[in-house]
Amino acid sequence: MTENVDVLLIGGGIMSATLGTLLKDLQPDLKIAVLERLSDVAQESSNAWNNAGTGHAALCELNYMPEGKDGALDPAKAVAINEQFQQSRQLWASLVAEGVLDEPSTFINATPHMTFVRGEKDVAYLRKRYEVLKEQPLFAGIEYSEDSRVINQWAPLLMQKRLKNDEPFAATRVPAGTDVDFGSLTRQLFANLGEKGVEVATNHDVKKLKKQKDGSWQVSYRHVIGGTPGSINAKFVFVGAGGWALKLLQRSGIPEIKGYGVFPIGGQWLKTSNPAIVAQHRAKVYSQASVGAPPMSVPHLDTRVVDGEAALLFGPFATFSPKFLKNGSMLDIVTQVRPHNIFPMLKVAVDNPSLIKYLVSELLKTHAKKVDSLREFMPTAKDEDWELLDAGQRAQVMKRDKAKGGVLQFGTEVVTSADHSIAGLLGASPGASTAVSIMLGLIKECFPERMAEWEPRLRDLIPSYGETLNTRPEMARKELDATAHALAINP
């Protein structure tokens, strides 16, 4: 490999692909290299079957808009998530127009986003949520119904053979939702980087990161095949290695990683490719999470389009493995322990008994019990039509907290060294959908001296860069229409 580079990206997922694409576009003469431990890129969390493929825009995910103690609903977080996804849409649209990405249907497809709830309490909540969101420009077009005939038109599998005397139900629908194949998107971005001279080295396992006197990093690795050692020197390092980001940042020795740990949660889907069933459902339908369940385990029945083939997924069902990645080590959960993070992690364990109880109950579910859970969504589901599919590992962030001692944090977090020479991403959903926004924030923090030069190009690629669409209704409508047309995702 090249011995010296300006930027080294560790990990071959959507985050590294996005950051590399942005940096190479903003400054074409940057020398960039990528190290990936597996035999190809996009094999872990970015792989299409390892994630839900939801273009997370808070259109259907209730956990982004929890009910306050006073019963009030604040749309701020839902709006913020939507704003971030719009930046992703804008960048992808620009890259399609410039030939960086292939036809939009190879990685994104229009798929309505729905929420379906049962019971008086949840119906009342969903109705209130709808009343709040319909006033937000980025949620224009959201629909609400408690009428079985209307919901049947939206998603027939939800209504077929549902008992009329069952508890009340309601649904919201946003036709402008999307299904995203992040695996295909990641591969296309890396392929383009390769054409621009970026070396993407697979089967390279990073073993050590050492800070040099000149401020750069010497990164040592081994070839997975043969075990040949090597090293590369980089002025800036990004660690986008999923669950292993914690381990690599710990090896770097930066003080900013102290107090952090991760709790791995695996998952499984029920999947069907039966064309007779798949043809009856075109939506991503989310509901309320079970008591004690993490937000990433919100049940949903999804249309997926991967490599041009449609299928349905239901889940996820939580599993447990001490590995931080599907292709990780059984010792991961132990080898992360340090004197500085053991207390926060123990505090998280003490403070989250409902999560432990939930995980145990999930592990005890048989295939038949999992299909029983599906029948709450789809009353006509038959055991033989659905197979179990392993999803990716999610490494949820545990971190030190002054007030509580330690907290379990859902979502993503960028950890950056004080001198901005190394940064890494921890956490999970909605990471992939908001990768562009996360990487824009990282670029601004780690390359502040370049921003004045780079911002005009960023505004070309991402028209809403530096602005908020939701506070500008006309601009919101214009950009939503423009990206829908460019990405061929008009509902």
Image: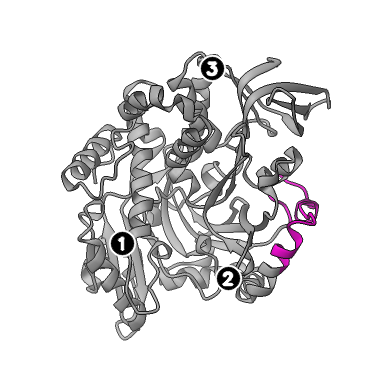
In the structure shown, which secondary structural element does the residue marked by tag 1 occupy?
loop
What is the C-alpha distance between the residues marked 3 and 1? 49 Å
Comes first in the chain, label 1 or label 2: 1
- Please name the predominant secondary structure of the magenta segment in the image: loop
| Residue picked out by circle 1 | 155
Residue 326 seen in the figure: no
Front residue (pair 204, 158): 204
> Does the residue at mark 3 contact the one at mark 1 (Cβ under 8 Å)?
no
Residue 337: in magenta span? yes
- Vertical arrangement, residue 301 with respect to residue 469, above or below: below
What is the C-alpha distance between the residues marked 1 and 2? 23 Å
- Vertical arrangement, residue 318 with respect to residue 94, above or below: below
Front residue (pair 381, 447): 447
| Residue picked out by circle 2 | 368
Q: Which mark is residue 337?
A: none
Image: magenta residue range: 322-346
Instruction: Give the amino acid type for the residue marked by disc 1 in the picture.
Output: Ala
| Residue picked out by circle 3 | 30
- Quadrant housing residue 126: bottom left
Q: Neighbour class for label 2 at 10 Å: few (<14), some, many (≥20)?
A: few
Q: Residue at x 54, y 65 (%)?
A: 294
Direction from residue 425 to residue 28 in the image, left or right: left
